[in-house]
Image: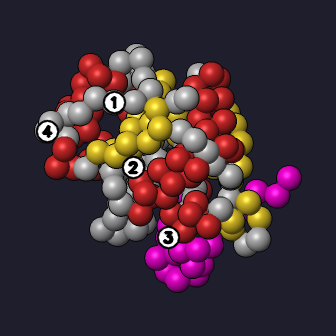
Amino acid sequence: MTSFTIIGTGNMGGAIGGVLAAGGSDVSHVTREQLSAAPALGDVVVLAVPYGAVDEVIAAYADQLDGKIVVDITNPLNFETFDSLVVPVGSSAAAEIQAKLPTSKVLKAFNTTFAATLAGKQVGGLPTTVLIAGDDSSAKGALAAAITAGGIEAIDAGSLARAHELEALGFLQLTLAVGEKISWTGGFAVAR
């Protein structure tokens, strides 16, 4: 059984944990206050924090992230203006994290879903689908297996380079929700 440590206890961290636990995974959560204590990490570490907090997490865990699967769920948008991403053009939050954690297997996932669609397991009557990008196929397979065991769908979206497009999609979805064009229980679904 794969063990997951979810760093972050907000809506997304709770919803992701619920999906993973429903599939039989061992799930633990780390709060921001626990970062200084740096408790032991599971096989897979989910960064369910705002992009601006990622460096703090990396600093707190440093070598403990070596060799781990690290799942980046962030959407690195400018939360003051909601009009741009804060990563270099052509890059992604996931690529920036991979550069800081060269021995970790960084995946991009969950950033194109809302917490309500993870908890409800549906978007507009279709199964919630998590898109996963990353360069390590076994890491993507392990995450996809845990997600599907939890009752939702997972699709391999390609290499970590595809995180750029996933973050653009997440950015669009967030701006539509903030602008009340779609609800927080809505979003994009994948019909197969």
Q: Position of residue 117 (x, y in %)?
A: 60, 65
- Residue under label 3, please give it: 175
- Nearer the observer: mark 1 or 3; the answer is 1
Density class for disc 2 (Cα within 10 Å; few <14, some 14-19, many ≥20) is: many
User: Which numbered disc flags the more N-terminal residue, 4 or 2?
Assistant: 4
Residue contact between numbered discs 1 and 3, judged by CB atoms under 8 Å: no
Q: Is residue 30 left or right of residue 159?
A: left
Type of the residue with mark 3: Thr
In this figure, which colouring scheme has been used for the structure? secondary structure
Q: Quadrant of residue 124?
A: bottom right
Reply above or below: 37 against 110: above
Query: Where does the magenta region start and end?
Result: 170-192
Q: Overall secondary structure of the magenta stretch?
A: loop
Secondary structure of residue under mark 4: loop
Q: Quadrant of the N terminus?
A: top right
- Residue under label 4, please give it: 36
Type of the residue with mark 1: Leu
Q: Position of residue 151 (x, y in %)?
A: 68, 52
Q: CA distance from mark 4 to mark 1?
A: 13 Å
- Check residue 41 in the rendering and tell me which mark sits there, or answer none: 1
Magenta span has 125?
A: no
* Residue at the image point whose x is 66% and y is 36% from the top: 145
Q: CA distance from mark 4 to mark 2?
A: 17 Å
User: Which numbered disc flags the more N-terminal residue, 1 or 3?
Assistant: 1
Secondary structure of residue under mark 2: loop
Secondary structure of residue under mark 1: loop
**In this orientation, does residue 29 appear?**
yes
Secondary structure of residue under mark 3: helix
User: Which numbered disc flags the more N-terminal residue, 4 or 3?
Assistant: 4
- Residue under label 2, please give it: 48
